[in-house]
Image: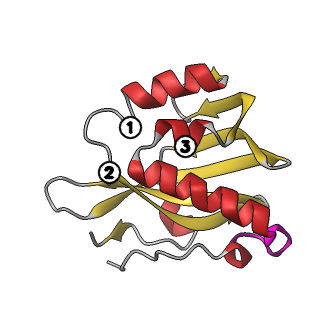
């Protein structure tokens, strides 16, 4: 198990994305996800953004639909602190290893890989590949200490 890194290093994601505006957007994204801040997350999305979680066949489009989904499920209940993210890259795009709190062990178990697509300074797509075995392919730990 490795300790959670708190610093987002964009140069680890993609050197050409080392722009301060994008760095700020990614940091806001991580903060929104880790604190279950639906409004904070939605403020980063373009109005027609999409959200999907393969292998689930459904997907969601638009801030309102994404907000409804996330607010009722992923960020539902006592979700502040439920998730942790570690930066990675996927096909040249910013991404994160997504970890979910294991109530039994109080550690964070790998959940999958999340890939963001930007258009300018707005996120136009969030795809979360819900497969914990992907962590190893991205050289991310399978578990994080709480």
Whether tag 3 and tag 2 are in contact, CB under 8 A, the answer is no
- Answer yes or no: is residue 58 visible: no
Other-residue count near label 1 (Cα within 10 Å), few / some / many at <14 / 14–19 / ≥20: many
Vertical arrangement, residue 129 with respect to residue 146, above or below: above
- Residue 14, quarter of the rendered image: bottom right
Which residue shows up at 47% across the image and 49% down it? 33
Label 3 belongs to which residue? 40
Q: Residue 75 carries which label?
A: 1
Residues 132 and 75: in front is 75
In this rendering, the label closer to the viewer, 3 or 1: 3
For the record, the magenta segment spans 13-19
In percent of width and height, residue 41 lies at: 56, 42
Q: Does the magenta stretch include residue 36?
A: no
Mark 2, residue position:
82
Numbered disc 2: secondary structure: loop
Q: Is residue 105 shown above or below 78? A: below
Q: Is residue 15 shown in magenta?
A: yes
For the residues labelled 3 and 1, the Cα–Cα distance comes to 12 Å
Describe residue 132's horizontal placement relative to residue 13 as left or right: left
Which residue does the image show at 68% across and 62% down from the upper left? 24
Q: Quadrant of the C terminus?
A: bottom left
> Which is in the foreground here, disc 3 or disc 2?
3
């Amino acid at each position: 198990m490795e300790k959670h890194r708190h610093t987002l290093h964009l140069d680890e994601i993609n050197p050409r994305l080392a722009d301060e505006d994008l760095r700020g957007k990614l940091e806001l994204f991580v903060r929104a996800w880790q604190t279950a801040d639906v409004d904070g997350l939605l403020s980063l999305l373009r109005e027609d953004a999409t959200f999907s979680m393969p292998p689930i066949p459904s997907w969601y489009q638009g801030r309102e639909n994404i907000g409804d989904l996330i607010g009722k499920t992923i960020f539902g209940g006592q979700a502040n602190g439920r998730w942790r993210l570690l930066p990675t890259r996927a096909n040249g795009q910013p991404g994160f290893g997504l970890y979910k709190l294991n109530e039994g062990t109080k550690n964070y178990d790998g959940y999958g890989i999340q890939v963001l697509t930007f258009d300018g300074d707005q996120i136009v797509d969030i795809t979360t590949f819900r497969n914990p075995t992907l962590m190893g392919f991205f050289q991310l730990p399978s578990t994080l200490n709480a």
